[in-house]
Image: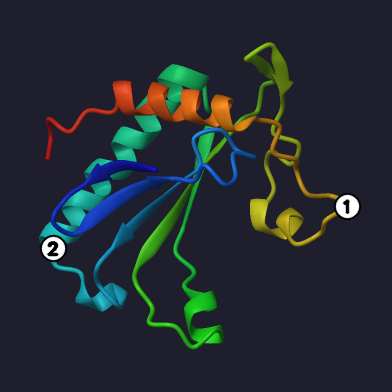
Amino acid sequence: MQLYKGKTWEIIFADYSQEFIGYSIISSNKETLSDLTNEDWIELGILEKELERVCKKLFKATMFNFVCLMNNAYRDNEKPHVHFHFIPRYKNKFVIFDKPYSDKHFGYNFYKWDLNKFKKQKDIFSKEEKLAIFNMLKEEFKTNNL
Protein backbone atom coordinates (compact mmCIF):
# COMPACT_ATOMS: atom_id res chain seq x y z
CA MET A 1 0.00 0.00 0.00
CA GLN A 2 1.63 3.20 -1.18
CA LEU A 3 1.96 5.90 1.46
CA TYR A 4 4.12 8.26 -0.63
CA LYS A 5 5.55 8.51 -4.15
CA GLY A 6 8.25 10.98 -5.16
CA LYS A 7 10.89 11.33 -7.88
CA THR A 8 13.32 8.83 -6.32
CA TRP A 9 11.54 7.39 -3.28
CA GLU A 10 8.27 5.73 -2.47
CA ILE A 11 7.03 4.54 0.88
CA ILE A 12 5.19 1.26 0.99
CA PHE A 13 3.20 0.41 4.10
CA ALA A 14 4.01 -3.23 4.86
CA ASP A 15 0.43 -4.46 5.14
CA TYR A 16 1.71 -8.03 4.84
CA SER A 17 3.34 -7.65 8.25
CA GLN A 18 2.53 -5.27 11.08
CA GLU A 19 4.44 -7.04 13.82
CA PHE A 20 5.79 -3.56 14.51
CA ILE A 21 3.00 -1.04 14.02
CA GLY A 22 3.88 1.38 11.20
CA TYR A 23 6.51 -0.90 9.61
CA SER A 24 7.17 0.42 6.11
CA ILE A 25 9.65 0.15 3.27
CA ILE A 26 11.25 3.28 1.81
CA SER A 27 12.23 2.19 -1.68
CA SER A 28 14.11 3.87 -4.51
CA ASN A 29 14.65 3.33 -8.21
CA LYS A 30 18.46 3.34 -7.73
CA GLU A 31 20.52 0.14 -7.78
CA THR A 32 23.25 0.98 -5.25
CA LEU A 33 23.75 3.43 -2.41
CA SER A 34 26.48 5.17 -4.41
CA ASP A 35 23.90 5.90 -7.16
CA LEU A 36 21.99 8.18 -4.78
CA THR A 37 22.45 11.90 -5.32
CA ASN A 38 22.80 14.45 -2.54
CA GLU A 39 19.18 15.43 -3.21
CA ASP A 40 18.11 11.79 -2.86
CA TRP A 41 19.80 11.56 0.55
CA ILE A 42 18.13 14.81 1.67
CA GLU A 43 14.70 13.55 0.58
CA LEU A 44 15.33 10.23 2.36
CA GLY A 45 16.17 12.10 5.56
CA ILE A 46 12.98 14.15 5.34
CA LEU A 47 10.87 11.03 4.71
CA GLU A 48 12.43 9.07 7.57
CA LYS A 49 11.99 12.01 9.94
CA GLU A 50 8.33 12.39 8.92
CA LEU A 51 7.66 8.68 9.46
CA GLU A 52 9.18 9.00 12.94
CA ARG A 53 6.99 12.00 13.73
CA VAL A 54 3.86 10.22 12.56
CA CYS A 55 4.55 6.98 14.46
CA LYS A 56 5.41 8.88 17.64
CA LYS A 57 2.21 10.93 17.40
CA LEU A 58 -0.17 8.11 16.48
CA PHE A 59 1.27 5.14 18.34
CA LYS A 60 3.79 6.58 20.85
CA ALA A 61 6.73 4.74 19.24
CA THR A 62 9.83 4.86 21.43
CA MET A 63 12.58 4.51 18.83
CA PHE A 64 13.17 3.22 15.30
CA ASN A 65 15.25 0.66 13.46
CA PHE A 66 16.24 1.87 9.99
CA VAL A 67 18.09 -0.70 7.92
CA CYS A 68 19.34 -1.23 4.38
CA LEU A 69 20.41 -4.81 3.79
CA MET A 70 19.79 -5.71 0.12
CA ASN A 71 21.07 -9.26 0.64
CA ASN A 72 18.08 -11.10 -0.78
CA ALA A 73 18.33 -9.56 -4.25
CA TYR A 74 21.89 -10.79 -4.62
CA ARG A 75 21.10 -14.14 -3.07
CA ASP A 76 18.09 -14.64 -5.36
CA ASN A 77 19.80 -13.25 -8.50
CA GLU A 78 17.33 -10.38 -8.77
CA LYS A 79 18.11 -6.83 -9.80
CA PRO A 80 18.87 -4.98 -6.55
CA HIS A 81 17.35 -1.64 -5.65
CA VAL A 82 18.11 0.56 -2.69
CA HIS A 83 15.48 0.29 -0.01
CA PHE A 84 15.31 0.82 3.71
CA HIS A 85 13.18 -0.98 6.28
CA PHE A 86 11.58 1.49 8.69
CA ILE A 87 10.66 -0.36 11.90
CA PRO A 88 9.05 1.54 14.77
CA ARG A 89 9.84 0.00 18.16
CA TYR A 90 7.72 0.22 21.30
CA LYS A 91 8.99 0.09 24.87
CA ASN A 92 5.53 0.43 26.39
CA LYS A 93 2.54 -1.83 25.91
CA PHE A 94 -0.68 -0.26 24.67
CA VAL A 95 -4.11 -1.15 23.36
CA ILE A 96 -5.15 -0.63 19.74
CA PHE A 97 -8.42 -1.88 18.22
CA ASP A 98 -9.22 -3.35 21.66
CA LYS A 99 -6.13 -5.57 21.40
CA PRO A 100 -3.14 -5.43 23.74
CA TYR A 101 0.02 -4.75 21.77
CA SER A 102 3.59 -5.13 22.95
CA ASP A 103 6.92 -5.13 21.16
CA LYS A 104 7.99 -8.51 22.46
CA HIS A 105 11.67 -8.01 21.64
CA PHE A 106 12.09 -4.30 22.35
CA GLY A 107 15.77 -3.41 22.63
CA TYR A 108 16.88 -6.28 20.41
CA ASN A 109 17.47 -6.66 16.69
CA PHE A 110 14.04 -7.40 15.21
CA TYR A 111 15.47 -9.57 12.44
CA LYS A 112 17.17 -12.00 14.82
CA TRP A 113 13.77 -13.08 16.16
CA ASP A 114 12.09 -13.00 12.76
CA LEU A 115 14.18 -15.97 11.66
CA ASN A 116 12.92 -18.16 14.50
CA LYS A 117 9.29 -19.20 14.01
CA PHE A 118 8.94 -20.05 17.71
CA LYS A 119 10.23 -16.72 19.01
CA LYS A 120 8.93 -14.49 16.19
CA GLN A 121 6.60 -11.70 17.23
CA LYS A 122 3.13 -12.39 15.89
CA ASP A 123 1.19 -10.02 13.63
CA ILE A 124 -2.09 -9.63 15.54
CA PHE A 125 -4.02 -7.47 13.09
CA SER A 126 -6.77 -8.36 10.64
CA LYS A 127 -6.75 -7.11 7.07
CA GLU A 128 -9.30 -4.42 8.04
CA GLU A 129 -7.20 -3.29 11.00
CA LYS A 130 -4.10 -3.04 8.82
CA LEU A 131 -6.07 -0.88 6.40
CA ALA A 132 -7.15 1.30 9.34
CA ILE A 133 -3.50 1.68 10.46
CA PHE A 134 -2.52 2.61 6.89
CA ASN A 135 -5.31 5.20 6.71
CA MET A 136 -4.19 6.70 10.03
CA LEU A 137 -0.64 7.02 8.70
CA LYS A 138 -1.81 8.38 5.34
CA GLU A 139 -3.99 11.02 6.96
CA GLU A 140 -1.20 12.22 9.28
CA PHE A 141 1.73 11.96 6.81
CA LYS A 142 2.71 15.39 5.47
CA THR A 143 4.66 16.05 2.30
CA ASN A 144 4.92 19.84 2.78
CA ASN A 145 8.69 19.66 3.28
CA LEU A 146 9.38 17.84 0.01
Q: Is residue 80 above or below residue 21?
A: below
Image coordinates for residue 58, horizontal then vertical, percent: 45, 18
Amino acid type of disc 2? Answer: Asn
Residue 52 found in image quarter: top left
- Label number found at residue 118: 1
**Residue 99 tag number:** none
Q: Amino acid at mark 1?
A: Phe
Q: Is residue 95 visible?
A: yes
- At mark 1, the secondary structure is loop
SS for callout 2: helix
Query: Residue 38 shows which numbered tag?
Result: 2
Give me the residue at 48% from left, 29% from top. 131
- The residue lying furthest to the front in this view is 128
Looking at marks 2 and 1 on the same chain, the residue that comes earlier in the sequence is marked by: 2
Residue positioned 69% across, 38% down in the render: 123
Mark 2 nearby-residue class (10 Å; few <14, some 14–19, many ≥20):
few
